[in-house]
Structures are given as structure tokens and as C-alpha cells.
Image (spheres, rainbow, N blue to C red):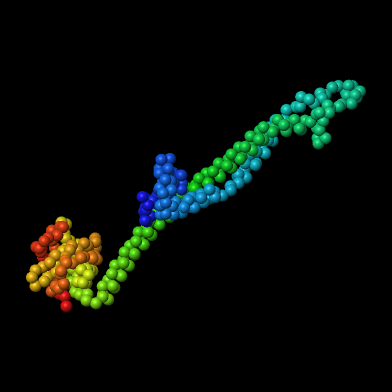
Amino acid sequence: MKHDRATEEIRELAALYALGALTQQEARGFEIHLAEGCGVCRAEQRRFARAAATLGLAAEERRAPEYLRDILLERIEREPQAPDPGAPQSTGPEEESGRILELPPAEASPAGGGSGRHGFGRSLPWLLAAVCAALALGGGFAWKSARTDAGRLRAELAEAAEGAGRTGDELRTLRARSADLDTILEMTRRQGVQSTHLVGQPATPANSGMLLWDAGRRRCLVIASFLPAPRGQVYQLWFSTPEARVPVGVLEADAGGRILARLRTPEGLERALSAVVTLEPAPGSVSPEGPFCATGSFR
């Protein structure tokens, strides 16, 4: 099924898919839905994929702490230097004066002798181990930093998704209000539209509003501010004719008592003397039974 607008559920699914947080079955189902050509879900998936792609570039390079170098050098200096088993042993003075000491060609070192070379060779494993430890520690710092940055980006991504949802709701509300305003302006400009002010009665003196009636198109628009109706009761609009009171419809108010109702008037009703709003048992009555809450006369 293709969607005509992005809902909070669609945004959450696209965000989790971009982060790889869906199960294999959920991800497969979402991919099948995208393959079916849902433009709304495809747009949300691309938007969150671009945001998730920045996660891999979020971690900055971190150098290993300077004190690791001092620890490494100190460890090398403490390493004991064992005597070279291939070095010539000292003999008596008489033997030394009678022959020239020679080193085997393979062991000779023009840079300072074989003893230092063998000593460095024995220190090499410790040196490599220390270097690996330093790299591992530095990598641990970088990994921890990257993980922190990734968590922060995930939180920002979720906050952006939530903000986008709120913005979408506000946009839909503004569009609805704009449509209501267009309806009001269109009815006030149309020839033959009748209007009346609704005035509160003794039972509800704070009630007030305005009514526009286009008899030719059988349309009625009520804009009012009424006291909230008691539980189990509703406001109902009636048109009074010389013969009877004709029911038009129920007026639904929000929590603040504001009413913006579009109603269809009965067929054949072309003339009325006044409009009356009564308080009736929900969901409304066939004939008025409750007290008058607002009235207005047509000119």
C-alpha cells in the first residue's frame, strides 16, 4: 500500500532502517515496500540514510597520550642487557699479547659491535609489545570517542525526526485553518448568503457566534465560542420556519469551547425566520427538548 503522507510510524521505520536497527524480517518487508514504488517512504529512507552516512565521519582522530612514550622508554632502559654468548672471552695477559682477537665475519658490526645488536634483538619483542599496547590504548580512546559521537548523532537524528513530525502536524493544522478561512471568505462574497449573530440566552449567557447560510448550495457555516457542553449532552442547531423547527446538525466544540462547523441543510429548506441552538442529549434529538443556548434572526 502506497502512502500519501509521511507519518510518525513511517519516519521511525525509515530511521531504524537507515541505522541498521531493524530485524532481518522487518528490513526485508520495508525493502519490498520501497520496491513497490512508495514515493513517501522512499523520500524518508533517503533523508535518514544521508543523516546516518555522517556517523562514520563523526569520529575525530585521537593521538595516543604523551605519557605512553615516557613509559615505553623507561621500560626499555630497565630491560637487562645479557652478555653475548658469541663474544670472545677474556684470557690471561700472556695469551692476549700473543694473538690478535678476531670476531667471526658473520658477527662483526661496523656500527659498534655485535653486543649492542644482540641486546637490541632481545629487547625487540618487548618494544613491539609496548608499541602494540600504545596503539591499542590509543585505538581504545578513538573507539570510545567515536562511540560517544555516534550516540550523540543518533540522539540528534531522533530529535530531528521528532521535530519533523511536529512541523508536519503544525503544517497540517495551518492548512486546515487556511481552508476554513477560504470557505468563510467565499461564503461572505457569494450573493444570496444569509447571516445572523448567535446570542447567548439566560441558560448560557457567555455563548456567542456567527452563522452563514447558503440556501442555494445547502451549506451552513457556524463560527462560535460556547461553554463546554456537559457530559452526555451536545449542542444542536435548528432553523425555525413558520411551520416548525427543522434540525440542521450537531455542533461539536473543542476543549476550549470553540466551534467551526460545516453543515448540510435539509433539502427543500429555502427560507427560515431564525436559528436556534439547544442543549440536547447525545447524539441529538428529533425535536428540540433542551434549553435554548443561543439564537439569531435572519434578516
Judge left or right: residue 141 versus residue 98.
left
Does residue 159 show up?
no
Work out which residue is located at the far front of the displayed protein and give it: 268
The residue located at (53%, 48%) in the rendering is 56
Residue pictured at 76% horizontal, 27% vertical:
84
In the displayed structure image, the side of residue 129 where residue 5 appears, left or right: left
- Side of 284 relative to 38 (left or right): left
Q: Quadrant of residue 239?
A: bottom left
Say which residue appears at 46% left-offset and 48% top-offset: 18
Residue at 67% x, 39% y: name it: 73
In the image shown, does 52 or 36 lie closer to the viewer?
36
Image quarter of residue 101: top right
Provide residue 58's location: percent of width, then percent of height: 53, 50
Q: How many marks?
A: 0
Image position, residue 10 (x, y; %): 38, 51
The reply, left or right, for residue 229 in relation to residue 90 is left
Is residue 207 visible from the viewing direction of this image?
A: yes
Rendering quarter of residue 95: top right
